[in-house]
Image (cartoon, rainbow, N blue to C red):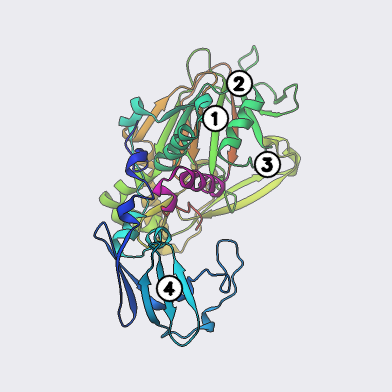
Amino acid sequence: MLPGRGSDMNDSKLQAPERTRIRTVETTGRQVLVDWEDGHRSRFHHQWLRDNCFCARCGDTWTGKRFIMLTDFEADVHPSHAECDAHGRLVIHWDGEPHRSVYEPFWLRRHCYSKAERERRRFRPNLWDASMTEQLPTVDYPRARADRRVLFELYGYLRDFGIVRVREVPADEQGSRSLGELIGVLQDYGYGEIQDIASVVDYSGELAADVEDTSGTYQLTLPTNNPIPPHTDQLFHYAHPGIIFFHCVEPNPQGGGASVMVDGFRVVEDLRAQAPDAFALLSTVPQMFTRHIPEASADIGGFGRGVDFRGGGRAICLNTDGDVVGFRYHSRATAPLDVPEALMEPLYAANRELVSRLNDEHYQVRFTLAAGEAVILDNHRVLHAREGFSGRRHLRLFQVGREEFHNRLRMLANELGDESADWLLPGGALG
């Protein structure tokens, strides 16, 4: 198994006894101090504790049936008494009101906001480059469907590395659909929920016309001899696809058309260290992407109508801690730069720095999908490309949302008792 914070189930149990057993409770002027059996000390502010009373009278935020508001208690609210009861729970009696709050130790520790615990919940992606070619995260589809722990392994690879290869997927359309539904809910971005991408040439060597298969699924024919550079997909949408799948139905008979994958997070972390000015621009200045198909040629791309999509944002998205949480770039959909004059040349220079790295083989993992294999990508992190080839090749492309994937990941982590359920996962390239 590849290394990763979620790789070893035994090292990430939520309910380790020493972590969730209260040793002592002490009340200070503005906080309640809780000492735990593992030696950690939590400091919970009185306001925070009162705000997070989830009794029947106050309601809870899990279900949305919340009745108490911040203005229902004073900012200087404080306990008259705090203790650890016979069941190991923190119990607080509030001064000035006949109210008693009870907190389970497991819940308290999960929500401790000390520096150490917040750092523990911080997501750290596994960064990679071409050296991962021989260690590409891989899971067998039948085992993932049959075993919840193998499914969690698949989820963990996709979360930590942004990529996972899946073997032994049935080659029919239902096989594609079932794989997608294992991760989330299939989404339609104009090509249908499942898009067949078939490369076909006629006997003259020219690109054949677009074709429909017998099921009526749209097939997009592509030039068979052109490589495609690294990119993330469909950035011209306000909210572009989250998790994308490439399912190989028929590989190229000559073995061409190898897949090329690039870890955008690894590239931009190197950019941060080696070209900080470029990193600063790419993480603050938004860029636009476009897809314009005139109505007269509405059949191009399978939209069935003319389209004029325009969307975008910063190439590098950061959270408030400065961590990279999303990446986007697509040279074939980039709109003309529209930035203040003073930024035009610096932004071009920054984009050159970026593109030179994206096309550097040092960062590129290359492999060829066999029939019945699929690769799943986080489209807000990992760029995909392909080598050129001649002849026929048939893949299916489909996508699900990152939010639903993260939802299922957390639910399964909770089911298996894994603390990664509480990791603060990256929101993606949304700003």
Q: Amino acid at mark 1?
A: Arg
- The stretch of residues the image draws in magenta is 401-422
Residue at 29% over, 55% down? 276
- Dot 1 lies on which element? helix
Mark nearest the camera among 4 and 1 is 4
Disc 1 or 3, which lies upstream in sequence? 1
Q: Which residue is mark 2?
A: 171
Residue 192 horizontal side relative to residue 110, left or right: right
Q: Which residue is mark 3?
A: 190
Mark nearest the camera among 2 and 3 is 2
Helix, strand or loop: magenta stretch: helix
> In this orientation, which residue lies closer to the viewer: 42 or 206?
42
Residue at 54% over, 83% down? 72
Report the residue that reaches farthest toward the left.
39
Q: Marks 2 and 3, Cα distance to the nearest angstrom?
A: 23 Å
Q: Are marks 1 and 3 in contact (CB under 8 Å)?
A: no
Q: Which residue is mark 1?
A: 145
Bin the neighbour count of mark 4 within 10 Å (Cα to Cα): few under 14, some 14-19, many 20 and up.
many
Residue 263 lies in the magenta-colored region = no
Q: Amino acid at mark 4?
A: Leu
- Dot 3 lies on which element? loop
Residue at 65% over, 43% down? 189
